[in-house]
Image (cartoon, rainbow, N blue to C red):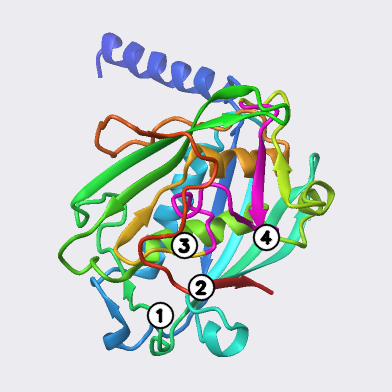
Amino acid sequence: MTRKQLFIIQFGLLALLIALAVPQPAFAGLRITTVFIDSDPPPPDSIAGGGNLRAIVNAAARKWERVFRGSSNWDLTIEYGWSDTYRDNGAAYGVETLEDQGGTPVRPTRARILFRNSRTPDGFYNWYADPTPHNNNEYQDYESLLAEVFDQDNEPIGELNVGRLFHATSGAAAGRVDLLTVAMHEIGHALGLDHRYDGHKEQVTGVTVDIKSPLPFAGLSIIMQTGTHIWAFDPTVLMSINPTAGTRNLITAADALVIAQLTSFDRPDLGEPPGVPRVRPLKCGRLTLGPPRTTIPVPDATE
């Protein structure tokens, strides 16, 4: 080995030691750890698409992590699996249970989510399990919706995103309930839209969640349904009480604002998520958008 080669090796080792000695930036934002509960999927005639629940739940978790990144640390563990939620809870699609909370500010730290694995009950829809949940290729149309919103004195605040929707007009996703949408919805409950959570108990004392500074759209009161679902802007927000067959609901700015308010997370990302088409947003001036195009009776529950 030449002196030059020895110098290069020694210099490389020194650089490595310096890099290890420099404090690395601490993780900031929401980090969701998912733990699969070994369980049987629904019968083949109740689910289509070929997707895997583990990949779908992990994709749903990453979408929420993007929204709640870069502010304060928040670790949440979610145990999840298949179960006969319709028999046990009357939930045709999914059920979430908050199991632990803590930290400063107090936030959910552990939850359990179960998805229906029985044959599809009458009046409900079969599952669509996306084999590629990190993209939306199985859906043919996309729309983004803005609503003009006002404060409690009826003064205009701005235009709030209240819908990010993919629609399937053909293929396996058409006419079926999207498992990824339900997974994102149930994680939304685990993030704070749960009656057991202290932040929910303290702030949802009536029928609204009041958005306060330093959050954007401070002064807006968002009307809730059953305390854990968003009634304002139904059915286009993710946290509406009913999913729509053939539609994938992504996380909207309205969904993010409600959970950020409950959990004291002051800088949620309300911007358009990656991977959606660039379209001109549709605008509406009404607080409530009206009934879904395809209604499904109360699909989920919290114990």
User: Circle 1 sits on which residue?
Assistant: 124
User: Circle 3 sits on which residue?
Assistant: 183
- Give yes or no for residue 264 being in the magenta stretch: no
Which mark's residue is nearer the viewer, 3 or 1? 1
Q: Position of residue 44 (x, y in %)?
A: 28, 86
Mark 4–mark 2 CB contact (< 8 Å): no
User: Which tag, 1 or 4, sits closer to the chain's start?
Assistant: 4
Q: Is residue 221 left or right of residue 34?
A: right
Q: Position of residue 247 (x, y in %)?
A: 32, 59
Residue depicted at 73% across the width and 36% down the height: 264
Mark 2–mark 3 CB contact (< 8 Å): no
User: Which tag, 4 or 2, sits closer to the chain's start?
Assistant: 4
Count neighbours of disc 1 (C-alpha within 10 A) and say few if under 14, some if 14 to 19, many if 20 or more. some
Q: Mark 4 falls on what kind of element? A: strand
Q: Quadrant of residue 118?
A: bottom left
Residue 110's disc is: 4
User: Which tag, 2 or 3, sits closer to the chain's start?
Assistant: 3
Which amino acid does the dot numbered 4 rest on? Arg
Q: Mark 3 falls on what kind of element? A: helix
Mark 2–mark 1 CB contact (< 8 Å): yes
- Give yes or no for residue 220 being in the magenta stretch: yes
User: Which tag, 3 or 1, sits closer to the chain's start?
Assistant: 1
Residue depicted at 22% across the width and 54% down the height: 139
Q: Quadrant of the C terminus?
A: bottom right
- Residues shaded magenta: 217-241
Which amino acid does the dot numbered 2 rest on? Pro
User: Which tag, 3 or 4, sits closer to the chain's start?
Assistant: 4
Q: Position of residue 222 (x, y in %)?
A: 64, 43
Which mark's residue is nearer the viewer, 3 or 4? 3
User: Circle 2 sits on which residue?
Assistant: 299
Which amino acid does the dot numbered 3 rest on? Ala
